[in-house]
C-alpha cells in the first residue's frame, strides 16, 4: 500500500558499490535489498508497496536499460534511479525517455543520490495510490449490471436521459432508474464526479 514504508532496491555488479549505496540508504531510514545482477532482481516477487530501484547501467548479462525495458514489458511500474560510471548523454536521454526518474554519474554524491531516491519514492507512492484507486473504481464498475454499464458509459459522455433512452431503445423512466442505481453503486454525488471516476479507471466510453 502507498502508506507502507518504502523499499529501495540496489542492483549493481560491483560489491563495494552495493555495500556503500546500501549503507547510505539505510542511514537515511530506508529498508534496502541488494542484488548483484538484473536477472537476480527479476526473480524477486513484485512488491505491493512504494519501491525505488537504484540501477547500474552497465552490468554483465542483462544491462540496466534492458532490465528497465523488461519491467515495462511485464507491466511492472518502477521508479528507477540510474547510476553509471560513464557519462554517456545518449544513454541518459534514452533512460529518461523510458521513464527513469534520475540519471546519475559515479562517483555519486550522497546528497544528490538521496534526493533522487526521495523523488523516486514520492512518485512510487503516487503511482501506487492511483493504482489502488483505479482498482477500487473497477470493483464498483463490476458491481453494475450490463444495462447499468451501458447507461454509465452514456451518462459520462454528457447525454441526457431522453438521448440515452433513444440510444438504448428503452423508456426515459427506465433510464432514470438505471442512472440512479449507477450513481449509488459508483458512490458518485454528481455527473462530474462520475466522469472523474471513469477517467481514473481508464474507462473508454462510446462517442455520442
Image: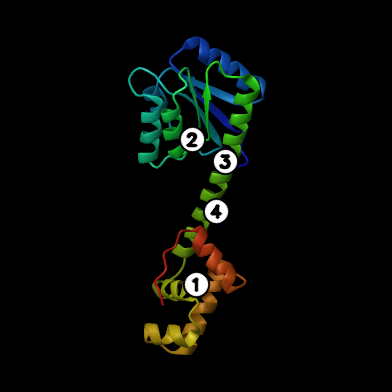
- Distance from label 3 to label 1 (Cα)? 29 Å
Q: Quadrant of the image for the C terminus?
A: bottom left
On the question of residue 201 being in view, the answer is yes
**Residue occupying the point 54% across, 45% down:** 127
**In the foreground, 47 or 77:** 77
Q: Which residue is mark 1?
A: 156
Q: Nearer the viewer, mark 4 or mark 2?
A: 2
Q: How are the colours assigned in the image?
A: rainbow
Q: Position of residue 49 (x, y in %)?
A: 55, 38
Residue 124 vertical position relative to residue 103 in the rendered view, above or below: below
Residue on which disc 3 sits = 123
Identity of the residue furthest to the left in this view: 61
Q: Earlier in the sequence, mark 4 or mark 1?
A: 4
Task: Please tell me which residue is depicted at 39% across the width and 29% down the height of the picture.
Answer: 65
**Tag 2 and tag 3, C-beta contact below 8 Å:** no
How far across and how far down the image is residue 66, in percent? 36, 29
Q: Which residue is labeled 2 in the image?
A: 100
| Mark sitting earlier along the chain (4/2) | 2
Based on the displayed image, in which of its 4 quarters is residue 164 positioned? bottom left
Which of disc 1 and disc 2 is earlier in sequence?
2
Q: Which residue is mark 4?
A: 133
SS under mark 4: helix
**Element class at badge 1:** loop
Q: Is residue 192 above or below residue 135?
A: below
Amino acid at each position: 500500500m502507498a502508506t507502507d514504508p518504502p523499499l529501495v532496491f540496489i542492483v549493481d555488479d560491483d560489491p563495494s558499490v552495493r555495500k556503500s549505496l546500501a549503507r547510505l540508504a539505510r542511514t537515511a531510514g530506508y529498508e534496502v535489498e541488494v542484488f548483484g545482477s538484473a536477472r537476480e532482481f527479476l526473480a524477486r516477487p513484485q512488491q505491493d508497496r512504494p519501491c525505488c530501484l537504484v540501477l547500474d547501467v552497465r552490468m554483465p548479462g542483462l544491462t540496466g536499460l534492458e532490465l528497465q525495458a523488461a519491467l515495462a514489458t511485464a507491466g511492472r511500474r518502477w521508479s528507477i534511479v540510474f547510476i553509471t560510471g560513464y557519462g554517456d548523454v545518449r544513454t541518459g536521454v534514452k533512460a529518461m525517455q523510458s521513464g527513469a526518474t534520475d540519471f546519475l554519474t559515479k562517483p555519486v554524491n550522497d546528497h544528490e543520490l538521496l534526493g533522487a531516491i526521495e523523488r523516486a519514492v514520492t512518485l512510487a507512492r503516487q503511482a501506487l495510490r492511483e493504482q489502488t484507486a483505479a482498482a477500487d473504481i473497477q470493483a464498483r464498475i463490476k458491481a453494475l449490471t450490463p444495462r447499468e454499464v451501458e447507461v454509465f458509459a452514456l451518462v459520462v459522455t454528457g447525454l441526457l436521459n431522453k438521448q440515452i433512452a433513444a440510444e438504448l431503445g428503452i423508456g426515459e423512466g427506465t433510464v432514470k432508474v438505471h442512472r440512479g442505481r449507477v450513481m449509488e453503486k459508483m458512490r458518485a454525488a454528481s455527473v462530474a464526479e462520475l466522469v472523474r471516476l471513469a477517467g481514473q479507471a481508464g474507462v473508454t466510453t462510446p462517442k455520442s
